[in-house]
Amino acid sequence: MIPLRTSDELKTWVEHSFGYVFSQPALCDAAVTHRSAGADHNERLEFLGDSVLNCCVARLLYDAHGQADEGALSRLRATLVSGETLAQIAGELGLGEHLRLGLGELKSGGFRRASILADALEAILGAIFLDSGFDAAAAAVARIMGPRLADLPAADTLKDPKTRLQEALQAHGLALPVYTLTAVAGDPHAQSFTVSCEVPVLDVSAVGEGGSRRRAEQLAAAKLLELLPSEIWKPV
């Protein structure tokens, strides 16, 4: 269990992490308050911050990748604003130490839970937007996201396996792969799906198994990509 930080400690942390000082400290307090801790929680701020974050990241990518098309920019943005990435950033900043949680969440380790960390990070950005406007929020986003912009992978590598497989085949005038659901097992709440992926003209096929049909198809496509001739597909 972690001790509750004081308002002064929270203020200092926000200034150090986001380069921002709130003129309305109550907004900051609400941003780090989980709904388990009281009525004045951060869900509305998180909703607002999500939109602000997406817009700010879109602008950063637009400026940084002048030759990227819409699809590439969308994939890069999805990587930066994913719950996983936001939780990582929140963890690196030490946000969990400043969360205000109800006793149950505190005992169960809510200050380490990825979804709570990601939501609180977005809520802080929403609070900054309400406190000082878009430019202040954009500066805060640039501060926490900047280091990750330079480390982004090539946009093409972010395409899912089904898309990469389809594009590789189409580039060589080949027919699209055929996906077939071959088995469904398990109870309704915990089913496992098995799907085969086949490219008949190349006489190659692969099988994927996952917790959803879509997941199984993606896994099958990923395996089949590795079976394609090198002149059609070269793994990154």
Image: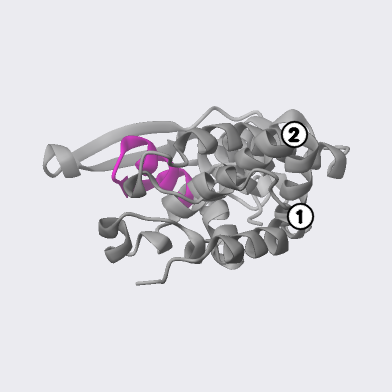
What secondary structure is the stretch in magenta mostly built from?
A: helix
Q: Is residue 6 above or below residue 136?
A: below
Relative side of 134 to 119, left or right: right
Residue 196 place in picture, x, y as percent: 34, 40
The image quarter in which residue 3 lies: bottom left
**In the foreground, 16 or 233:** 16
Query: Which disc is residue 54 wearing?
Result: none
**To which residue does mark 2 refer?**
133
Q: How far apart are marks 1 and 2 (CA)?
A: 16 Å
Residue drawn at (67%, 42%), measured in percent from left and top?
A: 128
Quarter placement of the C terminus: bottom right
**In the foreground, 155 or 50:** 50
**Is residue 172 visible from the viewing direction of this image?**
no
Q: Residues within 10 Å of mark 2 (few under 14, many from 20)?
A: few
**To which residue does mark 1 refer?**
143
Q: What element carries label 1?
A: helix
The region drawn magenta spans 206-223
Question: What's the amino acid at mark 2?
Answer: Gly
Q: How is the image coloured?
A: one colour
The image quarter in which residue 170 lies: top right
Q: Is 213 within the magenta?
A: yes
Question: What's the amino acid at mark 1?
Answer: Arg
Residue 49 place in picture, x, y as percent: 60, 37
Residue 138 place in picture, x, y as percent: 76, 41
